[in-house]
Amino acid sequence: MAFIIFKDRNKEWRQVDDEKAKNLLNWWITANPADKIVIEGYGGTTAGEIKDIKLGKGQEDKNTIEEKLKEWRAARKGKLAMSPQERAENTTAGHFSLFYFGIYGVSPSQELIDTAQGQVEEFYCANPQWTIPRLQTYAKSIKLKGEQIQESILKILERRESRELQDIEFETNVKNKHAEEEQERINSLAWQR
């Protein structure tokens, strides 16, 4: 049996079917906090109300949400450590191909990918905190004129961009908090003199 714990509901582990827990875990890792889901036996909840999920016997603790988030952040830090050119080479082909396919129903030519990669590199130079480019960057690279993207692909790309914005906001808040704490420490040391 697997277990789930909610942030504000009794703060105790509750049993969930193993298969449902795996599906829930996969959904929750990339969900936005406001995304809603119905969990059989517990009713509706949002991703933000779930504190953690532990899979049943035979599963290692690395499958918990906290470990998945650590892995996610480590991968993000790895991408941020790359130069803008390396990051563009690493992210453009797949991400741009999905965007292009969503509009035209075919894969882009290598020439289009190279053009997009150049614009993505410029984007990363101007926005070093991003690990994926904004969708507007791709739209500029192929000079869209009112074409529509498939809704299912648009949702995938928008969700990823939304997650990127949340990560940037989180990192900014953490840096600001550390800066404030450091300033308070400095002020308290100065006060003691």
Image (cartoon, grey):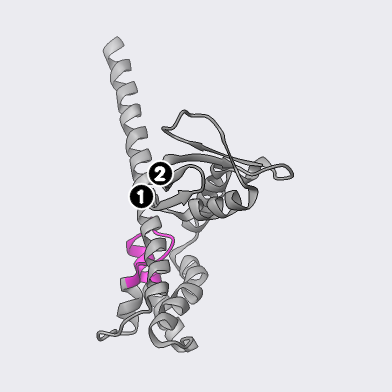
Position in image of residue 93 (x %, y %): 49, 76
What residue is shown with label 2?
48
- Quick check: 130 left or right of 144? right
Residue at x-position 42% and y-position 64% = 132
Q: Residue 34, labelled with which disc?
A: 1
Other residues around mark 1 within 10 Å, as few (<14) / some (14–19) / many (≥20): few
Residue at x-position 31% and y-position 31% = 180
Per the image, label 1 sits on a secondary structure element best described as loop
Vertical side of 90 occupied by 26: above or below: above
Quadrant of the rendered structure where residue 129 is? bottom left
Q: Are marks 2 and 1 in contact (CB under 8 Å)?
A: yes
- Quick check: 31 left or right of 68? left
Q: Is residue 114 visible?
A: no
What range is drawn magenta here? Answer: 120-135
Position in image of residue 38 (x %, y %): 45, 50
> In this view of the protein, which residue sits in the foreground, 98 or 80?
98
* Distance from the alpha carbon under mark 2 to that under mark 1: 6 Å
